[in-house]
């Protein structure tokens, strides 16, 4: 049994920022005794970001369903914790059992962002695992990685034993089996992993370089496997969402439940790597989505759920799913949110359902400021649709809207950059001042396995010049401007299309202190410049335009996309020609489908040949959920706006295509033209006015919930690991426990209803208490003992329900009724004999003085305690002012000083 470092870590928790990052006591956490295989799911980011990631939750659930496998989590320690670990010679450990990372059989990293690579190396180093795969022996874990960055893992290749391309639900079982079958024989494990579909073993491939420094080829050492093809989960319905996900006690970035409604996207936005590497399109059964989501919310107690995909507005069942979910969840004050949404996917039905609880934030992604450039990048909508969407947002009561753009897109001109400011201003004007519009801008980074993989990226100087232009133009138009740090985009671009020669640069930068490079305040460009110079690497080599015939570092990794298709799509981009949606119109022969097992799976009523269209199976259910507004409408009311538009548009597009000839035969460019001719706008687009009139929606305000009829005062204990839960997180923890317990908690009224929970004075983080109180207001009367029992059963470890009493709804607040607070300071850990300790405390109480205000006469500290001076919000000791909980820190420091 591996050693646990739980007690050693507990001694560190009072010394770090946000100790809740390292507790591992969340609801849903799984800790097993003596499994055959220990699998660490590692995420090279801080807890708040890592715990928000749905993919990790899915694999955690899949692995822990196996009785012979224990999956545990390990995240990057914040710099303060890393410093303590190094100072005290402690390893990085898992959250659940506090086992050192080096004591696991497998450590699997999720690679979501190139600027987490130094964190990955830091985690290996702190976990006591050799950085380089060639230096590991049989006693070390197998280190693998997956995620979108795995489609070009070459800068990390020397540090990884294996890389999973594609979907992991089925592949992780094969990985476990391979390791268990050859435990103790590292070479045999690597050979077995290489035989797993979708698993790339970098040690079995060797890069070779030409005399000019470019990559000549990547040679497979096993000629029978020249290319590694990605793993595809052919049907999402085969894997239900996690049944009991981890519910964090600490506020995280995406602090809500998440349900994946579809995977893959065939809209073909030419800059979007995820839209290409996760093809084909696979949708979940809408009826099952509703049932799974309803169970998930009951088990977790979250107050919000997000329906996740690359473009949820295009999900076939989005209208009936939203309607059914809101009918079930709105009475519980649970909100539904969608991720960043394509403008042409929005409809009044979607927005009307979301606003029934509260107006969650909305981000729209025009990406480019002009229609010409939107056609280049395959953004299939017109400006008028965006303006009409803004009007609709304002009419439905939204007050803020974020617009997401990119700069540096292929063929971009100054006119396109200024177009960002113009478009944002027109959006604000369309809403007639009712929307606060923010333009958020990032720098385009060409990604592997996309049509733009050959394009150049802006230099740092070019990026800063565009930022200055936008700052001026948006400022003139009174539009808020946010931008992604130019240096972060520079590093992202460097590694996204890098090769193995960057591994030395990466290791050098990490050893010199590079950490959390995706955080502007932590990114150290001086370290990166020095590391690049030390190894003779010119960044321009990696940011330049690549000739179409050049060997790319990822050419031996098959993302399921034919290179010929990517070249043809690049040719279409140059002409500003759109590629059709292959789930509805026709196959574009991208290479993602084999049309036997792997194909598009959707819930359209019909669609392109070769796809698995299952809409007929849900049509009756969907029609009952979203009844027709017009009995004469031949199209089902539940269909998405996108589906209706495309069915109208197909004939027009085919006629236009036949008049100008086949675009597939267009000559392939060696580079993207600087300023291609803008194509003529196709006719018959329609706009939001048509669908606003066709789909009427009520603008009635959110219905008020039932009023509070009872107030119960609950006494609880906050001990053990729970003492590190902060004040804000404590309120959220109690609310989610109340939801799981099905308690009828009352809510305030208004646009953002809040639960009627009122706590006593906040405890300092790290302080235990046997006597804490909270008032809970209910809409249906309950026996106090019933509330205490039901709520107590749902609270996490360390929060214990003690007793409950009913109080008048007009009774004073908890804080106003408190007469005093008694603190016990445990000095038993000090190496001081008890008599000497008692004498030291007495001397301190006699010698120290305090006063309420600066102009008061100082009094002995013992007298101040007797007169309860410390009950006031602030106090002064020897001329120094202390606020609130600072008085506890002051007393602790002074007592320790007196004793030692």
Image (cartoon, rainbow, N blue to C red):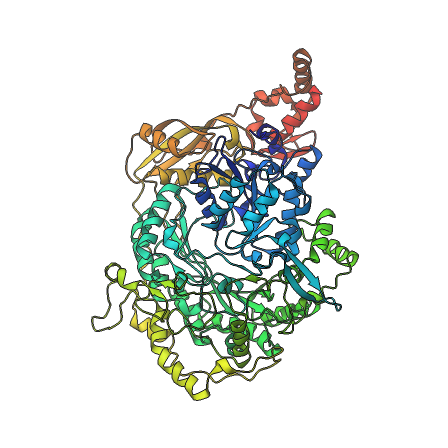
- The quadrant of the picture occupied by the N terminus is top right
Q: Is residue 547 above or below residue 207?
A: below
Q: Nearer the viewer, residue 90 or 722?
A: 90
Q: Is residue 762 left or right of residue 281?
A: right
Q: Is residue 806 left or right of residue 443?
A: left
> In the rendering, at what x and y percent does residue 547 appear?
65, 74
Using the rendered image of the protein, determine whether residue 519 is visible from the camera's viewpoint.
Answer: no
Q: Residue at x 40, y 47 (%)?
A: 303
- Identify the residue at the far bottom of this view: 659
- Identify the residue at the far top of this view: 835
The quadrant holding residue 639 is bottom left
Q: Nearer the viewer, residue 677 or 268?
A: 268
The quadrant holding residue 883 is top right
> In the rendering, at what x and y percent does residue 537 appear?
75, 61
> In the rendering, at what x and y percent does residue 539 appear?
72, 64
Q: Is residue 596 above or below residue 44?
A: below
Q: Is residue 334 above or below residue 502?
A: above
Q: Residue at x 57, y 20 (%)?
A: 866
- The quadrant of the picture occupied by the C terminus is top right
Q: Is residue 343 left or right of residue 285?
A: right
The quadrant holding residue 698 is bottom left
Q: Is residue 815 above or below residue 353?
A: above
Q: Residue at x 58, y 55 (%)?
A: 113
Q: Number of callouts in the render?
A: 0
Using the rendered image of the protein, determine whether residue 328 is visible from the camera's viewpoint.
Answer: yes
Q: Residue at x 34, y 53 (%)?
A: 289
> In the rendering, at what x and y percent does residue 714 appear?
39, 30
């Amino acid at each position: 049994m591996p050693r646990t470092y739980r007690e050693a870590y507990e001694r560190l928790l009072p010394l770090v920022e946000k100790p809740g990052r390292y507790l591992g006591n969340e609801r849903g956490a799984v800790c097993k005794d003596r499994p055959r295989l220990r699998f660490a799911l590692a995420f090279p980011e801080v807890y708040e970001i890592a715990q928000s990631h749905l993919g990790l939750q899915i694999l955690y659930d899949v692995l822990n369903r196996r009785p012979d496998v224990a999956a545990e989590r390990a995240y990057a320690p914040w710099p303060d914790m890393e410093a303590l670990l190094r100072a005290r010679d402690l390893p990085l450990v898992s959250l659940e059992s506090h086992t050192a990372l080096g004591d696991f059989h497998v450590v699997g990293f999720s690679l979501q962002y190139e600027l987490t690579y130094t964190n990955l190396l830091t985690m290996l180093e702190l976990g006591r695992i050799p950085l380089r795969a060639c230096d590991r022996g049989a006693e070390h874990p197998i280190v693998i990685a997956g995620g979108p960055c795995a489609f070009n893992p070459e800068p990390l290749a020397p540090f990884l034993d294996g890389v999973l391309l594609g979907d992991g639900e089925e592949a992780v079982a094969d990985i476990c089996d391979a390791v268990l079958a050859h435990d103790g024989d590292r070479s045999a494990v690597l050979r077995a992993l290489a035989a797993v579909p979708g698993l790339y073993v970098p040690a079995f491939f060797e890069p070779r370089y030409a005399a000019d420094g470019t990559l000549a080829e990547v040679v497979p050492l096993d000629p029978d496997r020249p290319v590694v093809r990605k793993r595809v989960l052919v049907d999402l319905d085969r894997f239900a969402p996690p049944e009991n996900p981890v519910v964090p006690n600490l506020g995280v970035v995406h602090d809500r439940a998440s349900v994946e409604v579809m995977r893959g996207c065939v809209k073909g936005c030419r800059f979007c790597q995820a839209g290409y590497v996760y093809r084909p399109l696979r949708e979940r059964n809408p009826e099952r989505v509703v049932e799974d989501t309803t169970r998930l919310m009951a088990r977790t107690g979250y107050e919000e759920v997000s329906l996740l995909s690359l473009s949820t507005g295009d999900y076939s069942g989005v209208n009936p799913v939203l309607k059914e979910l809101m009918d079930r969840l709105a009475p519980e004050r649970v909100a539904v949110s969608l991720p960043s949404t394509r403008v042409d996917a929005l409809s009044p039905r979607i927005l009307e359902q979301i606003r029934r609880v509260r107006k969650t934030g909305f981000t729209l992604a025009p990406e480019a400021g002009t229609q010409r450039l939107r056609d280049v990048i395959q953004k299939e909508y017109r400006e008028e649709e965006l303006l009409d969407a803004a009007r609709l947002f304002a009419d439905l009561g939204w007050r803020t809207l974020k617009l997401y753009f990119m700069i540096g897109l292929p063929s971009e001109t100054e006119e396109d950059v200024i177009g960002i400011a113009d478009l944002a201003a027109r959006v604000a004007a369309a809403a007639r001042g009712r929307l606060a519009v923010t333009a958020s801008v990032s720098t385009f980074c060409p990604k592997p396995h996309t049509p733009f993989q050959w394009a150049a990226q802006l230099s740092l100087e070019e990026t800063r010049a565009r930022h200055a232009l936008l700052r001026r133009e948006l400022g003139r138009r009174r539009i808020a401007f946010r931008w992604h740090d130019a240096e972060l985009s520079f590093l992202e671009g460097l590694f996204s299309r890098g090769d193995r020669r960057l591994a030395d640069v990466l290791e050098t930068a990490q050893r010199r202190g590079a950490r959390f490079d995706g955080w502007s305040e932590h990114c150290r460009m001086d370290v990166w410049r020095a590391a690049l110079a030390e190894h003779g690497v010119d960044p321009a080599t990696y940011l330049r335009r690549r000739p179409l015939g050049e060997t790319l570092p990822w050419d031996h990794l098959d993302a399921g996309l034919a290179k010929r298709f990517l070249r043809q799509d690049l040719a279409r981009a140059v002409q500003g020609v759109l590629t059709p949606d292959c789930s509805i119109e026709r196959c574009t022969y991208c290479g993602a489908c084999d049309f036997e097992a792997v194909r598009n799976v959707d819930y359209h009523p019909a669609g392109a040949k070769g796809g698995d269209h299952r809409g007929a199976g849900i049509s009756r259910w969907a029609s009952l959920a979203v009844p027709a507004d017009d009995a004469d409408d031949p199209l089902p009311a539940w269909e998405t706006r996108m589906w209706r538009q495309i069915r109208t548009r197909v004939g027009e597009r085919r006629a236009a295509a036949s008049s100008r000839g086949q675009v597939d035969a267009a000559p392939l460019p060696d580079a993207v033209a600087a300023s291609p001719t803008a194509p003529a706008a196709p006719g018959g687009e329609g706009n939001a006015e048509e669908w606003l009139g066709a789909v009427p929606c009520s603008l009635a305000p959110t219905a008020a919930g039932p009023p509070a009829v009872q107030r119960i005062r609950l006494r609880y204990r906050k001990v053990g690991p729970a003492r590190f839960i902060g004040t804000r997180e404590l309120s959220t923890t109690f609310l989610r426990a109340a939801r799981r317990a099905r308690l009828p908690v009352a809510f305030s009224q208004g646009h953002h209803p809040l639960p009627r929970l009122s706590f006593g004075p906040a405890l300092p983080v790290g302080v235990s208490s046997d006597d804490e109180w909270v008032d809970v207001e209910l809409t249906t009367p309950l026996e106090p003992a019933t509330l205490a029992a039901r709520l107590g059963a749902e609270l996490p470890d360390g929060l214990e329900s003690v007793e409950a009493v009913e109080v008048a709804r007009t009774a004073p607040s908890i804080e106003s009724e408190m007469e005093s607070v008694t603190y016990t300071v445990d000095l038993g850990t000090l190496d001081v004999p008890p008599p000497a300790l008692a004498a030291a405390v007495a001397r301190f109480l006699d010698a120290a003085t305090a006063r309420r205000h600066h102009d008061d006469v100082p009094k002995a500290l013992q007298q101040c305690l007797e007169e309860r001076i410390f009950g006031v919000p602030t106090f002064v000791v020897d001329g120094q002012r202390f606020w609130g909980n600072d008085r506890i820190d002051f007393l602790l420091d002074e007592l320790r000083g007196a004793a030692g």
